[in-house]
């Protein structure tokens, strides 16, 4: 079992450099809304165990564990798409029951049934994995760790019904006690029925009433002295007295004593079963862990299918490449896909643009998707994406000013950045929202550049948003920094939320003010108040934006033309395929018509040959019969198979018994049985027909390496298949697995009718077998067994041969 390797993510940690081990602050998960995404993912788990495991999900310690988890989720998604999820039905959290039996406790019947259901589910999950998971190593490894406990499961099933009732068969003592009590109750009922008939006039109504644990007669109060017994109760009106007749008092007391003994026996049985569960408690705990892991894998896979997510690649060199990524909490139809790269040619990404333009959403998307990848989850991207492994993600997002702590917005940002600088290093991702905001613009810009320089010196990867134009120039001049912006449509005054790499964002303040109606004179005075360098920067950005839009229009036009060309090509290829298919169908129809004509001629030839054989002693010679066959076969098309040329008369002696030949006059292949002394006549076995032909009238197909020792016809052995199959005592999955192979063998053996014996029982096995038969390709019809055939405990199947 150890050979299959550890399950992905079973333990925190693993192989890898200690410098690369994750140390993530819980505040990071909260700011990036990680738990909200995991909550949606946990809703797709089939069991409470899987939901609990997902709710506690956090990043793996080393990238190797995350990669193994991604591989397992990938396998689960493939199995989900091909075969559906494993049968998790019956899996409940039985950890409380296992803890109880470990300290010697006795479980209730309902708890024991839940444990048995869990054991059965484990067995079914393992069978499902073994049947479908051969090509998926992670799932196979998990299945091998599931240890069946069928003996304990059957022990519980033998003693307790599915509704929690302890069955009579649980023990011989319980069967005896219940049998005696039922006999006593039957005798009591007979006595009371006799009273109902003989004392009907003094009874309030002819029924037996239950008062406490006693069976009583409802006697009119004025006749209460006419029946000897014990008064158990009065009606609310006082007109009826409930009397337990003396004739049944002793019997009822005996029944009560038996009931007490029965309860003790049931308690003993439950304790014995609880001890049996305790013997396999460690195995069940391991199975619980494996089932929870499997459920979490398939929940991640189901979430990935719903979100159309793809498996990311985890890199160890600090490089991100996100292709059309979106935030998983945003509606799929509304989220604008994000294309972003970081860490390869630059390590600092400066995002600028107007408010409400989507800068903060971009930061959260990058951070959240990084967390998901490090937790072994697929990412909502529309292309192959790569995520760098981080030792930590430092996040400063949002306005965290606090009146109680006398912290302004600027102070709260600075406190977070100071904390980041204490831990950030080469394997850190730093997300900074509105860097340098909340103070004097010139000081804020200078401070922001100094902070970026410090993170760069530490080797960190940084994504920062800002409004400062100085940081746009910083990104142009810094060798490892890149500008980016979120697009804003000045015509509609609305953000498009598209991230444009390499292009700084314009503030658009003056343009927006002018479109909103601010007088031109005011706009012009404001423009004069802007520094020349800022004006030049804005003009440069405007020219770059115009050029980008023209390039995008050209690219869009080229894409449309390419799509049109592709459509024309597909139409041409489709028409070519249609013509080829039409020609193939016409050829097939012509071939079929020729075959029908040939078959008709062949049947007529066989009829004529049969008649001529009967008359050939009187009417025709053998060579005349051969000539007649030739004339009847003239309608046959030339065979595609090339035959070996017949040797000349001088070499006719090369034909020996065992040679495979073809007789063109009858269109059949056969084996040479005898050769005449002069080598000019042969006796050939053509199927069931033995025929004498001239050596020159055959085509040699194959010569044997040596003459056979016997000229007898060899027949292959036919596999013996029984006429009935017994599946009693098996589960539905086990039965249908064997039944499918049996039906295949029966069809090969040409059995027209077989019988499946499944018994009656609860009917679950019978119904499962018949559902399987109803959908089987070899089954023409089925019906319950008739008299002498097992009745409803068997099913008679008619096979389609």
Image (spheres, rainbow, N blue to C red):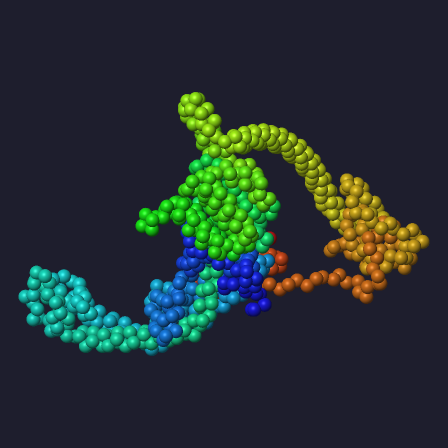
Nearer to the camera, 195 or 438: 438
Q: Residue at x 43, y 51 (%)?
A: 416
On screen, residue 340 versus residue 40, left or right, reads right
**Could you say where residue 138 lies in the image, as x and y percent from the top left?**
55, 60
Left or right, residue 777 beside residue 160: right
Residue 174, by quadrant, is: bottom left
Q: Is residue 475 left or right of residue 335?
A: right
Name above or below for residue 400 compared with residue 95: above
Q: Position of residue 61 (x, y in %)?
A: 51, 60
> Residue at 13% across / 65% down in the picture?
218
In this rendered view, identify the residue nearer to me: 666 or 732.
732
Number of numbered discs on residues: 0
Q: Residue furthest left?
A: 222
Give the position of the N terminus as an image quadrant: bottom right
Q: Residue at x 38, y 70 (%)?
A: 99
Percent coordinates x, y for residue 98 in the rendering: 39, 69
| Quadrant in the rendering for residue 232 | bottom left
Q: Is residue 40 visible?
A: no
Residues 334 and 398: in front is 398
Does residue 593 lie above or below 416 as drawn?
above
Q: Position of residue 591 (x, y in %)?
A: 71, 40
Residue sitting at x 87%, y 49%: 645
Residue 191 visible here: yes
């Amino acid at each position: 079992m150890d050979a299959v390797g550890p399950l992905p993510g079973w333990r925190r940690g693993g192989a890898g450099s200690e410098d690369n081990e994750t140390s993530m602050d819980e505040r990071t998960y909260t700011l990036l809304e990680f738990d909200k995404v995991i909550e949606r993912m946990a809703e797709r788990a089939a069991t409470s165990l899987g939901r609990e495991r997902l709710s506690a999900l956090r990043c793996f310690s080393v990238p190797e564990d995350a990669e193994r988890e991604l591989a397992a989720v990938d396998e689960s998604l493939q199995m989900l798409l091909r075969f559906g999820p494993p049968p998790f039905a019956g899996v409940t959290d039985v950890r409380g029951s296992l803890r109880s039996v470990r300290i010697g406790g006795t479980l209730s019947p309902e708890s024991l049934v839940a444990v048995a259901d869990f054991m059965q589910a484990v067995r079914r999950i393992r069978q499902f994995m073994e049947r479908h998971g051969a090509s998926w190593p992670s799932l196979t490894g998990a299945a091998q760790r599931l240890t069946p406990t069928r003996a304990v499961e059957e022990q519980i099933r033998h003693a307790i019904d599915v509704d929690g009732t302890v069955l009579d068969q649980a023990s011989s003592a319980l069967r005896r006690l219940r049998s005696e009590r039922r006999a006593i109750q039957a005798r009591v009922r007979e006595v009371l029925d006799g009273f109902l008939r003989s004392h009907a006039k003094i009874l309030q109504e002819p029924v037996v009433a239950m008062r406490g644990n006693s069976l009583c007669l409802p006697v009119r109060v004025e006749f209460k002295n006419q029946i000897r017994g014990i008064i158990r109760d009065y009606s609310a009106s006082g007109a009826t007295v409930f009397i337990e007749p003396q004739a049944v008092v002793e019997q009822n007391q005996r029944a009560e004593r038996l009931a007490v003994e029965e309860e003790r026996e049931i308690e003993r049985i439950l304790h014995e079963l609880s001890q049996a569960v305790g013997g396999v408690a460690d195995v069940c705990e391991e199975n619980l862990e494996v089932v929870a892991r499997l459920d979490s894998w398939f929940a991640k896979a189901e979430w990935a299918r719903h979100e159309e997510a793809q498996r990311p690649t985890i890199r160890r060199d600090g490089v991100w490449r996100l292709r059309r990524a979106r935030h998983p909490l945003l509606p799929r139809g509304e989220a604008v896909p994000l294309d972003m790269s970081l860490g390869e040619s630059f390590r600092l990404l400066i995002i600028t643009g107007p408010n409400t333009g989507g800068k903060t959403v971009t930061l959260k998307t990058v951070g959240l998707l990084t967390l998901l990848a490090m937790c072994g989850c697929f990412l909502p991207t529309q292309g192959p994406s790569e995520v760098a492994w981080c030792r930590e993600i430092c996040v400063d997002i949002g306005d965290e000013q606090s009146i109680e702590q006398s912290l302004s917005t600027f102070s709260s940002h600075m406190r977070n950045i100071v904390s980041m600088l204490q831990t950030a290093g080469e394997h850190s991702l730093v997300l900074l929202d509105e860097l340098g905001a909340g103070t004097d613009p010139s000081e804020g810009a200078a401070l922001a550049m100094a902070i970026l320089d410090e993170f760069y010196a530490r080797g960190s990867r940084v994504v920062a948003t800002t409004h400062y134009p100085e940081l746009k120039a910083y990104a142009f001049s810094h060798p490892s920094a890149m500008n980016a912006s979120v697009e804003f449509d000045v015509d509609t005054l609305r953000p498009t939320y598209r991230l444009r790499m390499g292009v700084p964002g314009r503030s658009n303040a003056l343009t927006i003010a002018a479109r909103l109606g601010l007088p031109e004179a005011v706009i012009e005075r404001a423009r004069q108040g802007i520094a020349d360098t800022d004006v030049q920067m804005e003009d440069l950005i405007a020219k770059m934006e115009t050029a980008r839009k023209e390039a995008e229009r050209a690219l869009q036009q080229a894409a449309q033309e390419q799509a049109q060309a592709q459509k024309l090509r597909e139409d041409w290829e489709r028409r070519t395929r249609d013509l080829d298919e039409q020609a193939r169908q016409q050829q097939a129809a012509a071939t079929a018509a020729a075959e029908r004509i040939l078959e008709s001629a062949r049947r007529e030839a066989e009829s004529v040959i049969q008649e001529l054989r009967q008359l050939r002693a009187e009417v025709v010679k053998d060579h005349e019969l051969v000539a007649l066959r030739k004339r009847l076969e003239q309608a046959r098309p030339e065979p595609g198979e090339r035959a070996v040329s017949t040797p000349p008369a001088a070499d006719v002696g090369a034909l020996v018994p065992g040679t495979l030949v073809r007789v063109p006059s009858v269109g059949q292949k056969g084996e040479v049985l005898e050769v005449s002394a002069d080598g000019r006549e042969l006796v050939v076995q053509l199927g069931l027909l033995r025929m004498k032909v001239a050596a020159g009238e055959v085509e040699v197909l194959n010569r044997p390496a040596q003459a056979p020792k016997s000229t007898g016809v060899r027949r292959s052995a036919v596999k013996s298949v029984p006429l009935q199959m017994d599946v009693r005592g098996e589960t539905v999955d086990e039965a249908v697995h064997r039944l499918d192979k049996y039906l295949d063998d029966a069809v090969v053996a040409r059995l027209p009718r077989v019988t499946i014996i499944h018994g009656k029982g609860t009917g679950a096995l019978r119904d499962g077998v018949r559902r399987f038969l109803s959908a089987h390709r070899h089954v023409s019809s089925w019906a319950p067994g008739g008299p002498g055939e097992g009745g409803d405990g068997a099913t008679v199947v008619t096979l389609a041969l």
